Amino acid sequence: MSAITVSHLHKAYGQVHAVDDLSFTVERGQITGFLGPNGAGKTTTLRMILGLVKPDSGSAAVDGVRYVDLANPVTKVGAVLEATSFHPGRTANAHLVALCAASGLPLSRAGQVLREVGLEQASHRRVGAFSLGMRQRLALASALLGDPSVLILDEPANGLDPEGIHWLRGFVTALAAGGCAVLISSHVLSEVAVTADRVIIVNHGRLLADTAMSDVVDLEGTYLELVTR
Amino acid sequence: MMNLIRAELLKARATRSFWALAAIAVAYCLGWAATEVFAFLQPGGHIEDTYGMAQQGNVFVMVLAIHMTAGEYRHKTITWAYLVTPRRGHVITAKLLSAALVGALIGVAAAVVTGGGAAIMLSATGHPVFTSGVPGVLLASVLAMALWAVFGASLGLLIRNLSAATTVAFLWFAYIEWMLMTFVPGIARWLPTGASEAIVGFSRTGFPTAGGMLPMWGGALLFLGYALVAASAARVVSVNRDVT
């Protein structure tokens, strides 16, 4: 069974079909790049997989189970959605400790994941003083709390400096090599080209391509041809 | 559920605004107790009213509770909450229960500080310090604070916009209730403020005089009813709404 199965997902906002009969799978041990222009429906799709947005029709499942039906989802799926979604008045540690408590994980996991993402020095600083890159690391730390086998990352490279991007690349590559399924939405084609094993391209909510990276000679050329067609 | 309540309490206490609002709520109660003793209390008057000031900071408790819920939308941290606990009804129940707990704890602090302060001030001004009605008034104050917190948390869940929720609460308690009371005689005791004042059994401002106050249990039930109506509406809208 695939780690993530999206089948015939559909979501409309008024007259706009944000996601239109979209189907794909994400497999374990691979990094799957999820590409498309702004407004192509990537974020809506990811949020439907995570049970935050209700599809009009179709379904999405993790290991064959809807996200909302998972017993303790953080132990199965980690998600990084928006870099800014923290309370500025809480410390990094307080944010993570509350997530640990809510999911019944030992509170000591907070310190462990902060070390994993290289934020241990900043653990007791308030998030309001964090740079965008630090927030991305904190979001990733939050996603890793339950030691999940499926990672969903929405534009994780936003705000990271070159050293941070290099670090992130190594990080997700190691996770995939360890058997995790990683789904990454991105605008940065060159980054996807060097990290992804598979690539999914969408526009206007529809699937344009779903292919192994090894079959793609020129990702940018292929992408531009598909989305401007 | 215990895990979720624990998480809510951890989140609440991790911000400075929480402690600031809690401190203001307690200080405000003490300030009103002093005002009561030095400005209003007549010899032989109701000294219980001084102790009843232990719930006077209820508006700050309500605002604090609005922050506990609408603040999650303001900072988009509700996304994390729902990712961890996709059964949203559980998150909302935990929020209401933890707000009640926070309100009760601040109520206890206010009762201790106001009660101690009132005793000292009453004694210094030659009034009797204690009557058999005092413990009941202090306990009722704690209950009122807990209910105001539930009310605020529900309001925040329902409106979701932090500034809008705070503004609505302000307009309601500062103006709209007073207008209703002016134009609809006898309605005062059925309004949230009237119900809340019935819980401690006195009116700070003669607010619910028209028709008299409800009995203590009636006020508590009515106020709880207001809070639960808001909470149920909040639950219905939250459970199905897309989080974007």
Image: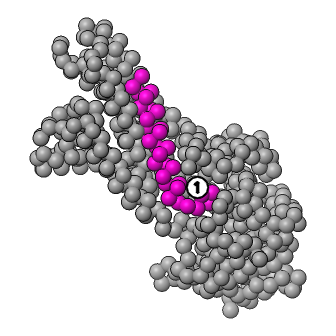
Q: Is residue B234 above or below residue B97?
A: below
Task: Identify the image quadrant of residue B77.
Answer: bottom right
Whether residue B111 appears in magenta in the rendering, the answer is yes
In the rendered image, is residue A91 in sight?
yes
Chain under disc 1: B
Q: Which amino acid lies under the numbered mark 1 shown in the image of this protein?
A: Ala
Kindly indicate the quadrant of the structure image that contains residue B230: bottom left
Magenta stretch bounds: B83-112
Q: Is A29 placed above or below B130 here?
A: below
Classify residue B103 as left or right of residue B41. right
| Secondary structure under the numbered disc 1 in the rendered image | helix
Which residue in the rendered view is the most extreme toward the bottom? Answer: A229
Residue position for label 1: B81
Q: Which residue sits at x=71%, y=82%?
A: A24
Relative placement, left or right, of A40 versus B228 is right
Camera sees residue B163:
no
* Residue positioned 54% across, 73% down in the render: A54
Residue A78 place in picture, x, y as percent: 71, 61
Residue B58 among those drawn in magenta: no
Where's residue A143, x and y in %?
71, 57
- Is B167 left or right of B209, judged from the image as shown? right
Q: Quadrant of the N terminus of chain A?
A: bottom right
Q: Nearer the viewer, residue B15 or B155?
A: B155
- Residue B214: image location, x then y, percent: 20, 39
- Residue beneath the point at 70% across and 43% down: A107
Q: In the rendered image of this protein, does residue B230 appear above or below residue B142?
A: below
